[in-house]
Amino acid sequence: MATKDSAKDATASWRRIEPLELTPILEAALEGFYDNGFHGTSIREIARRVGVTIPALYYHHQSKEGILRALLEISTSDVLARAHSAYADGGDDPRQQLTNVVEAIVLRMTTRSRLAALEGEVRYLSPEHRQRYRVVRKGVEELVLGIVTEGSERGLFSVADVPETTRALLAMCQSIPRWYHAKGELTPEEVAQKYAVIALNTVGCKPGRKRAR
């Protein structure tokens, strides 16, 4: 039978971000896309970084878009899974749920900033695959929207426009890869905690009530 501590460790796994294991091709492509953008990185350059021939690269991925799609699928599925785990770890308190979800998103944005920054290249996907990406992203938005809605209905939050506030919270988190650097002054954990406080302030978390950490 699982103990309370072991159950807590399991639900808090969203806070632990292990080193990302990518294939050599995806790792080389991620470095190239991060350095030069999708448009500025050729298949030849990716093959050169990996040390394989172009036909060998096409054997594993049919196109450069296919490589981008694989990286984006890893990225979006990772953040969605972590956000849902963080939400579940918040019990029935919207304040703790919002704190956890924002922390989960920010930890991922800082710890895997290269992968997170790649989401700006989604415009290069074909319409069909761009829509698939948006569906996953919508999952994160709907999760946060639900939290803010419930918090407002229960009088824990003071929000004039729930949908716009939700979009503002997510935009705040998504902008992190533009400025965060691993060698900067703040650790991922410190950034996550600061952004969680900002999120609570943004939704007008009522003073005098018990606040999430």
Image: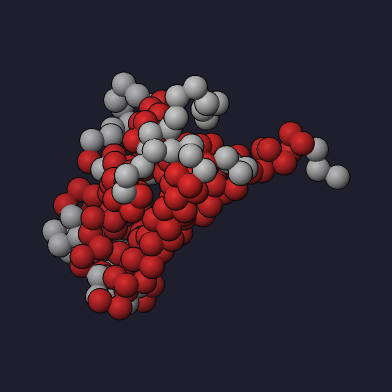
Residue 204: where, in percent of width, then height? 38, 34
Residue 9: x and y in percent read 67, 38
x then y, percent, for residue 180: 28, 34
Type of colouring:
secondary structure
Residue 161 percent location from the top left of the image: 31, 48
Residue beneath the point at 31% across and 27% down? 183
The quadrant holding residue 53 is bottom left
- Note whether residue 115 is visible: no
Pick the quarter of the image with the N terminus. Answer: top right
Tally of marks: 0
Q: Residue at x 18, y 55 (%)?
A: 37
Residue pictured at 62% horizontal, 43% vertical: 91
Q: Is residue 190 above or below residue 202?
A: above
- Tell me which residue sits at (74%, 38%) in the image: 6
Instruction: Check the image and report above or below for 93 versus 31.
Output: above
- Front residue (pair 14, 56): 14
Residue nearest the viewer, comparing 56 with 152: 152
> Toward the viewer: 50 or 10?
10
- Residue 141 in view here: yes
Q: Give the residue furthest to the right.
A: 1
Left or right placement of residue 74 versus residue 126 in this view: right
Query: Between residues 139 and 118, which one lies in front from this camera angle?
Result: 139
- Residue lying at the far left of the rendered structure: 40
